[in-house]
Image (tube, grey):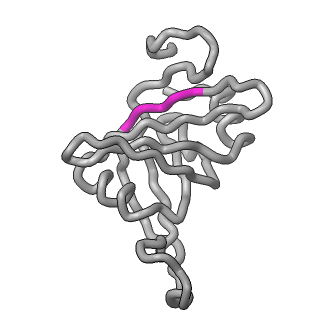
Amino acid sequence: MLTESMKKMVETVHHAFVASSGADGMPHLAAAEAVSVPDLQRLRFEAWFCPTTLRNVSVNPIVAVAVADPASGQGFQFVGRVETVEETAMMDGFLPDEPPGMPQVETRMTVLVECVMEFTAGAHTDQPLG
């Protein structure tokens, strides 16, 4: 599904935007870091995801993940299904002035990619690549 050149770009950019939606269809956008390509069918990334993202993928595992090179604006949109959600770190308590709802667990997600499309602000189609 992914190519070696896509893998190189994804792992060079190192961050992504993850779009999810819950049972109500309301979209939600999150940012992720440590993006990697463990094999040419999967993306893996980590973040201190907010409760909305975690709730959304628990009821609707289909996500869109956008990765773009900030210098060129060129990138890819990966659509797929969240396969795994793993806790990788946990805060050891709340700060006294911390707003309610702040993420307390860092999470790693692995997504099985089902479709890859070009992602750019320039003219493009929404046709799957390759």
Left or right: where 82 falls relative to 4: left
Q: Is residue 78 magenta?
A: yes
Q: Please report the residue visible at 56 percent of the width from the left and 19 percent of the height from the top.
A: 118
Query: 44 or 60, which is in the foreground?
Result: 60
Q: Position of residue 13 (x, y in %)?
A: 71, 41
Left or right: where 23 falls relative to 62: left
Left or right: where 90 falls relative to 54: right
Q: Please report the residue visible at 42 percent of the width from the left and 32 percent of the height from the top.
A: 79
Question: Is residue 62 shown above or below 73?
Answer: below
Total numbered labels: 0
Q: Please report the residue visible at 29 percent of the width from the left and 43 percent of the height from the top.
A: 26
Secondary structure mostly seen in the magenta stretch: strand
Question: Is residue 103 shown above or below 5?
Answer: below
Q: Is residue 1 magenta?
A: no
Most distant residue in the right direction = 71
Quarter-of-image position of residue 52: bottom left
Q: Position of residue 98 (x, y in %)?
A: 53, 81
Left or right: where 58 falls relative to 67: left
Q: Which residues are magenta?
A: 76-80
Most distant residue in the left direction = 23
Q: Please report the residue visible at 30 percent of the width from the left and 59 percent of the height from the top.
A: 55
Q: Position of residue 12 (x, y in %)?
A: 74, 41
Q: Position of residue 56 (x, y in %)?
A: 30, 52
